[in-house]
Image (cartoon, helix red, strand yellow):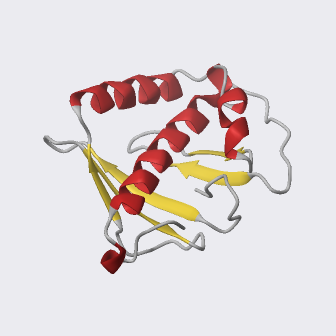
Amino acid sequence: MGLPGNEPDLSVLATVSLDGLPWTIVGCVQHTQAEVCATSARVELSDEQRRQFVTLLGEVHAMPECTPEPTLSADRSYRLAPTGSPVYEGRLPAAAAHIARSNVGACRADARLAWWIAELVRAAHLALPPAHGAGPS
């Protein structure tokens, strides 16, 4: 997914693994939306984060049929492909300050989950020492 913020080409690619404990999210932050990038973040979900994930995923599965929302050219695209579920695609506003307002309602459950995952990966990426290629992007 493209990350909202000042860098229009910054994106996150992530995989959530629910096989055994701890549940993990591994991914990367890069300056393109390529299909593959070197892993730069690993998040082991806490009990609270697992509950949040289950709640967010449940909301995605309960989404009603929704009318596509209008988007702006600067908006960032995302794609969720949960195992055994349909693929969900959409857009987030380019300005991170507008995320909370834009992600309200049943028809934005997929956007909320995409943003939640992206924020965890980005935070883990930024927490790595500079020798790993991390740091403010």
Q: Position of residue 77 (x, y in %)?
A: 67, 53
Residue at the image position 46 percent from the left and 55 percent from the top: 122
Q: Quadrant of residue 34?
A: bottom right
Residue at the image position 52 percent from the left and 20 percent from the top: 62
23 above or below 73? above
1 above or below 102? below
Q: Position of residue 125 (x, y in %)?
A: 39, 61
Image quarter hosting the C terminus: bottom right
Residue at the image position 48 percent from the left and 39 percent from the top: 116
Q: In the image as oriented, which residue stretches furthest toward the left?
A: 20
Residue 86 in sight: no
Q: Position of residue 133 (x, y in %)?
A: 39, 77
Q: Quadrant of residue 87?
A: top right
Residue 16 in sight: yes
Q: Is residue 21 shown left or right of residue 101?
A: left
Q: Quadrant of residue 100?
A: top right
Q: What is the total number of numbered labels drawn onto the structure image?
A: 0
Pick the residue in front: 104 or 36: 104
120 above or below 129? above
Q: Position of residue 7 (x, y in %)?
A: 68, 65
Q: Is residue 79 shown left or right of residue 20?
A: right
Residue at the image position 67 percent from the left and 44 percent from the top: 96
Image quarter hosting the N terminus: bottom right
